[in-house]
Image (spheres, rainbow, N blue to C red):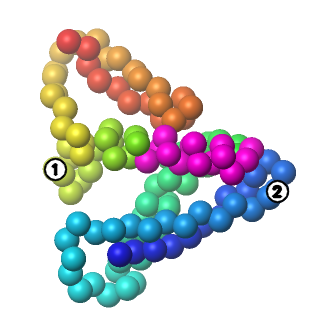
Amino acid sequence: MAADFFVVATITYRLLFVLVILAHDRWRVVHVAVTNAYAERVIGSSRRECLDHVVVMTEAGLRGIVAQYLAYYHHAPTHLALNKDAPVPRRVTAHGIVAIRSSAGSIIDTDRRAA
């Protein structure tokens, strides 16, 4: 298990503390510094891809943004560990019109070729 936290400031300069806990599918003995690197990577990705592009109003708003981002993160983006495939595999087509779908409050766009 890896854990870390980060802080998000609201528009009224209220600080919201976000705790990140990652459970690994495979249990193995790993040094704590290595496991925290996974949590730090998730935090960095969520900041770069999502939180740096929004203004958080309230704690409830932050919860909604994070929930939408996590839904995106677990389904849409490609991962090197998956040989550049997404966690939910999708058919790759070379021809067709590219359709863009917005998610996470129009912060994150995913594109797919229309059949």
Whether residue 37 appears in this view of the structure is: no
Q: Residue at x 20, y 81 (%)?
A: 28
* x and y percentages locating residue 32 in the rendered image: 37, 85
As rendered, which of 115 and 27 lies closer to the eye? 27
> Who is closer to the viewer here, 12 or 44?
12
* Residue located beneath label 1 in the image: 83
Say which residue appears at 55% left-offset and 54% top-offset. Answer: 47
Residue 28 shows up from this direction? yes
Q: For the image shown, how many numbered marks are present on the structure?
A: 2
Identify the main secondary structure in magenta. helix
- Give coordinates of residue 7: x percent, y percent: 65, 64
Specify whether residue 64 is painted magenta.
Answer: yes
Q: Quadrant of the N terminus?
A: bottom left
Residue segment shown in magenta: 57-70
- Mark 1, secondary structure of its residue: loop
Residue at image point 39% right, 74% down: 2
Which badge, 2 or 1, comes first in the chain's sequence? 2
Which amino acid, mark 2? Tyr
- Residue 13: image tag: 2
- Does 87 sit left or right of 109 as displayed? left
Outermost residue toward the right in this view: 12
